[in-house]
């Protein structure tokens, strides 16, 4: 298998989608509005991870592009839970890709304690041989959800997917704490946004001088 050739359109899709999603954030900033997007990251899944996922799902190599949906992965991180749904609505209205599946692990969190909203899209990449449609996964989550998922991911890696029971229950408690944090922050959202607007205006005045 020629991995460079196989992964090239995925690299292009990740680069393009990062620009597009970061562009959404920038438009809010130009308008001095609260951005529902805090930051955007993206990556192409490493070959080793593609192969181990394919093995787990018993996916033959000629079906990778159809069955491994997150070879191109984007992550949109938000301040508040409501912002996630604002971002999802914006994605639904876009004309440059089609949403083929939505997975709401926020209203229905995973057993591990994982919370996030996943949108699977079909994205057209222009290649020298014409248009190529490929799948990409956009994960949308709050800062608190991201903190939890990043730490849990590291522990999964450390323990090769077999996290000891006591650590698992601590992670479940931490997930509950992250949920509470999101709830509390949502309740004082207006206060936080007013404070951030004051800070932004002060910063703008200082840079105008
Ligand atoms: P990595 O290393 O992040 O790339 P499905 O066919 O829908 O059952 P799939 O594609 O695993 O299978 O879908 P799912 O469950 O929506 O998960 C896709 C990605 O979401 C994972 O990719 C993770 O990035 C993230 N994710 C899902 N569950 C968890 C979890 O319990 N903890 C953490 N930290 N992340 C999770 P990969 O390929 O598993 O991993």
Image (spheres, rainbow, N blue to C red):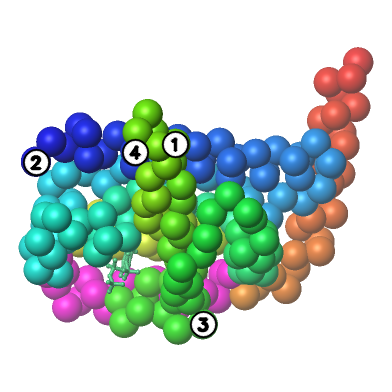
- As measured in the structure, the alpha-carbon distance from the residue carrying label 2 to the one carrying label 3 is 40 Å
- As measured in the structure, the alpha-carbon distance from the residue carrying label 3 to the one carrying label 4 is 33 Å
Q: Earlier in the sequence, mark 2 or mark 4?
A: 2
Q: Where's the C terminus, which quadrant?
A: top right
In the rendered structure, are the residues bearing label 1 and label 3 in contact, judged by CB atoms less than 8 Å apart?
no
- As measured in the structure, the alpha-carbon distance from the residue carrying label 2 to the one carrying label 1 is 22 Å
Q: Where's the N terminus, which quadrant?
A: top left
In the rendered structure, are the residues bearing label 2 and label 3 in contact, judged by CB atoms less than 8 Å apart?
no
Q: Which residue is mark 4?
A: 9
Q: Quadrant of residue 187?
A: bottom right
Q: Which residue is mark 2?
A: 1
| Number of on-image labels | 4
Which region of the structure is painted magenta?
161-182
The percent position of residue 3, horizontal first and vertical second, equals 16, 37
Which of the two discs, 4 and 1, sits closer to the camera?
A: 1
Numbered tag placed on residue 126 in the rendering: 1
Q: Does residue 166 show up magenta in the picture?
A: yes
**27 relative to 87 in the view: left or right:** right
Q: Which residue is mark 3?
A: 107
The percent position of residue 55, horizontal first and vertical second, equals 8, 63
Disc 3 packing (10 Å; few <14; some 14–19; many ≥20): few
- As measured in the structure, the alpha-carbon distance from the residue carrying label 4 to the one carrying label 1 is 8 Å
């Amino acid at each position: 298998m020629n991995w460079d050739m196989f992964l090239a359109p995925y690299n292009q899709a990740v680069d393009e989608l990062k620009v597009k999603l970061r562009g959404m954030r920038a438009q809010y900033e130009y308008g001095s509005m609260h951005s529902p997007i805090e930051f955007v990251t993206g990556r192409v899944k490493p070959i080793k991870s593609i192969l181990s996922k394919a093995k787990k799902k018993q996916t033959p190599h000629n079906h990778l592009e159809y069955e491994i949906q997150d070879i191109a992965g984007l992550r949109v991180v938000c301040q508040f839970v409501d912002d996630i749904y604002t971002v999802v609505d914006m994605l639904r209205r876009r004309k440059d890709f089609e949403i083929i599946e939505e997975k709401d692990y926020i209203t229905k969190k995973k057993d591990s304690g994982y919370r996030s909203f996943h949108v699977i899209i079909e994205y057209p990449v222009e290649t020298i041989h014409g248009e190529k449609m490929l799948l990409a996964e956009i994960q949308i989550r709050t800062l608190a959800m991201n903190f939890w998922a990043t730490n849990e991911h590291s522990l999964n890696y450390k323990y090769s997917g077999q996290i000891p029971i006591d650590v698992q229950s601590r992670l479940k408690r931490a997930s509950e704490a992250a949920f509470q944090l999101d709830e509390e922050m949502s309740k004082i959202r207006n206060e936080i946004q007013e404070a951030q607007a004051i800070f932004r205006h002060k910063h703008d005045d200082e840079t105008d001088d």
